[in-house]
Image (spheres, grey):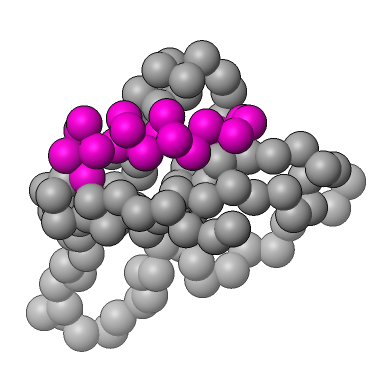
Amino acid sequence: MKSKKKTLSDLGGIMYSTDPGFNYEEKEETREEAIPNNKQDLRVMLDKKNRGGKAVTLITGFLGNDADLDKLAKILKTKCGVGGAAKDGEILIQGDFRDKVLAILQKEGYKVKKSGG
């Protein structure tokens, strides 16, 4: 079995230096600050495209880190009693729950608008 070729990115970006005074500084991960709920501008819409005719409620416009997105998705899925997913700054809730999601998000303090048809 062939072994995978190693690339520079596999080495963590460290390269050899002949300078005896060289000091490697690791980059710190930048953490996104939590944006308050009342500053978030979310859009709630119904989406049926590329889903085999099944409808999903799509929430877009979320700004923040993935942990906060997952937390909000869990709240929505629990209160609606359905499944869903959270990825790429979007939350998918299975089924047509636009009005219920709108009410829940407004209760949580988000600025929400219905979007689409």
Provide residue 16's location: percent of width, then percent of height: 36, 76
Taking the magenta stretch, the answer to whether it contains residue 99 is yes
Q: Nearer the viewer, residue 59 or 107?
A: 107
Q: Is residue 90 above or below residue 94?
A: below
| Residue farthest toward the bottom in the current orientation of the protein | 19
Is 117 rendered above or below residue 81? below
Q: Position of residue 59 (x, y in %)?
A: 45, 47
Q: Can residue 41 be seen in this snapshot?
A: yes
Rendering quarter of residue 29 = bottom left
Q: Nearer the viewer, residue 21 or 32?
A: 32
Using residue 20 as the reference point, say whether residue 47 is left or right of it: right
Report whether 41 appears left or right of 35: right
Give how far across and how far down residue 6 sits, in percent: 62, 63
Q: Residue at x 16, y 39 (%)?
A: 109
Quadrant in the picture for the C terminus: bottom right
Magenta part of the protein: which range?
92-110
Q: Residue at the location (59% across, 68% down)?
A: 7
- Report whether residue 86 is seen: no
Q: Please report the residue visible at 30 percent of the width from the left and 81 percent of the height from the top.
A: 17
Res 95 → quadrant:
top right
Q: Is residue 31 above or below residue 68?
A: below
